[in-house]
């Protein structure tokens, strides 16, 4: 049987998929692994990187042989497409790692004293404004924004109508907005 025969490869893949036939897989590996490695090396991968990627591609063949459809493409097209996609993913990961280790990501400017004072003042104003919100409204705000519950979940757990929950949360935010818009009094 000619190893280039499309039907021969489809039969081998079917045996891998259906029977986990190691001999069929070995024949596919022996045929495609060197071709994939050569192709990857020609696309600027080191031989070691190419070898590792070929192992990934052939692992995909072993675990996902059932996904190969000989009516849609030849086995070589399917495997080379997997190799191409894995190569692109590897390049993206490498680029991301290089970018993450660039010195510009580690330079941070310490906030000035005036910025820290403004932040503390703003935080105090927000705390004061939150303290002015009635407990029945604040309880619903906490559930929605700190516990991550949906309005429907809050209504169900509290035994309140959905409209009441929405109304109370809206009123709480209106009160908060008004409190924060008031001019700061100098003392």
Image (cartoon, grey):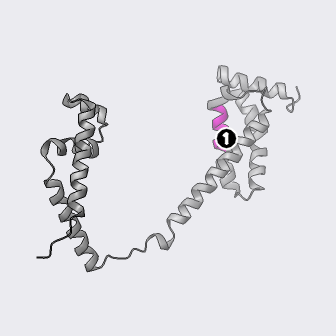
Residue 119 is left or right of residue 51, and the answer is left
Q: Position of residue 140 (x, y in %)?
A: 21, 41
Q: Which residue is mark 1?
A: 57
Element on which disc 1 rests: helix
Report crowding for label 1: few under 14, some 14 to 19, many 20 or more residues within 10 A (C-alpha): many
Q: Quadrant of residue 117?
A: bottom left
Q: Quadrant of residue 70?
A: top right
Q: Position of residue 108 (x, y in %)?
A: 39, 74
Where, quadrant-wise, is the C terminus in this rendering? bottom left
Would you say the magenta stretch is mainly helix, strand or loop?
A: helix
Instruction: List the single residue furthest toward the left.
Output: 187
Instruction: List the single residue furthest toward the right.
Output: 2
Q: Nearer the viewer, residue 96 or 151?
A: 151
Where, quadrant-wise, is the N terminus in this rendering? top right
Q: Nearer the viewer, residue 101 or 132?
A: 132
Instruction: List the single residue furthest toward the top.
Output: 18
**Residue found 67% across the figure and 41% down from its top:** 57
Q: Quadrant of residue 60?
A: top right
Q: Is residue 36 above or below residue 3?
A: below
Residue 2 is left or right of residue 11, and the answer is right
- Which residues are drawn in magenta? 55-62
**Residue found 66% across the figure and 20% down from its top:** 18
Q: Is residue 11 above or below residue 63?
A: above
Q: Position of residue 89 (x, y in %)?
A: 62, 50
Residue 31 is left or right of residue 22, and the answer is right
Q: Position of residue 27 (x, y in %)?
A: 76, 32
**Residue found 25% across the figure and 51% down from its top:** 174
Tell whether position 59 is magenta: yes
Tell whether position 155 is magenta: no
């Amino acid at each position: 049987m000619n190893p280039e025969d499309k039907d021969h490869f489809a039969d081998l893949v079917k045996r891998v998929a259906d029977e986990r036939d190691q001999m069929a897989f070995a024949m596919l590996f022996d045929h495609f692994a060197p071709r994939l490695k050569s192709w990857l090396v020609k696309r600027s991968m080191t031989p070691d990187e190419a070898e590792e990627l070929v192992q990934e591609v052939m692992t995909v063949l072993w675990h996902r042989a059932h996904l190969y459809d000989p009516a849609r493409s030849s086995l070589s097209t399917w495997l080379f497409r997997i190799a191409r996609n894995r190569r692109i993913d590897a390049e993206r990961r490498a680029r991301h790692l290089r970018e993450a280790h660039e010195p510009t990501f580690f330079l941070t400017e310490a906030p000035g004293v005036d910025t820290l004072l403004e932040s503390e003042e703003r935080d105090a104003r927000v705390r004061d404004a939150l303290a002015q919100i009635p407990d029945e409204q604040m309880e619903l705000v906490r559930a929605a924004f700190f516990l991550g519950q949906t309005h429907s979940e809050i209504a169900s757990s509290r035994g309140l109508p959905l409209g009441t929950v929405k109304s109370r949360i809206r009123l709480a935010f209106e009160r908060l907005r008004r409190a924060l818009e008031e001019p700061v009094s100098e003392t």
